[in-house]
Amino acid sequence: MADSNHGTPWAPILLRAAAAAAFGILTIFWQSPGVGVLSVAGGLYLLFTAGAVWRMAALAGARAETRIRSLQLLEAGVYAVAGLAVAAFRSAEAFCAAAGAALLVGGAVELYLGPRPAARSFRPGTG
């Protein structure tokens, strides 16, 4: 029974959701956090997102889905570089530029990969 979910990406998805929720709560309820907090919190959010996407890429690699794996590794790399840039440059402008670019690339990759698994798992005449 415990192996029924083997290979499913629930743990990386949960990590990604928790990072987004923590960053969202911090930015909503803290009135004026300052650039230092923005740099640390934003950098950590992007790095945790990179880790979650990297883990999903590892799961795709275990299923021999090399195209999905390579795109997710690209996405994870962009998130990681953006997170390190935000933490290193410590400015609101750096956060806007790096996070915006990372979210744009990540969103494009996920939009490209999104319909693929559903279309591949559909088999006419079985449902």
Image (cartoon, rainbow, N blue to C red):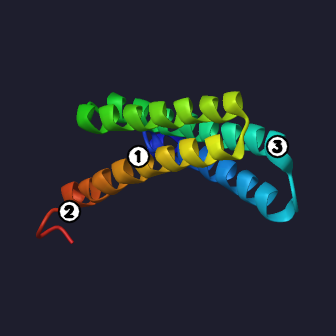
47 to the left or right of 73: right
Q: Are marks 1 and 2 in contact (CB under 8 Å)?
A: no
39 to the left or right of 126: right
Real-space Cα distance between discs 3 and 2?
A: 46 Å
Real-space Cα distance between discs 1 and 2?
A: 28 Å
Please say if 59 is above or below 18: above
Q: Pointer 2: what residue?
A: 122
Please say if 41 is above or below 122: above
Q: Residues within 10 Å of mark 3 (few under 14, many from 20)?
A: some
Q: Residue 6: where, in percent of width, then height?
A: 45, 39
Q: Pointer 1: what residue?
A: 105
108, 53: nearer the viewer: 108
30 to the left or right of 41: right
- Residue drawn at (30%, 51%) of the image: 113
Q: What amino acid type is highlighted by mark number 3?
A: Val
Q: Pointer 3: what residue?
A: 37
Any mark on residue 3, and which? none
Q: Residue 12: where, in percent of width, then height?
A: 55, 42
Question: Which quadrant of the figure contains the C terminus?
Answer: bottom left
Please say if 29 is above or below 71: below
Q: Residue 17: where, in percent of width, then height?
A: 62, 53
Please say if 41 is above or below 120: above
73 to the left or right of 67: right
- Residue drawn at (43%, 47%) of the image: 106
Judged by depth in the image, the label closer to the viewer, 3 or 2, is: 3
- Residue drawn at (64%, 45%) of the image: 93
68, 46: nearer the viewer: 46
Q: What amino acid type is highlighted by mark number 1?
A: Val
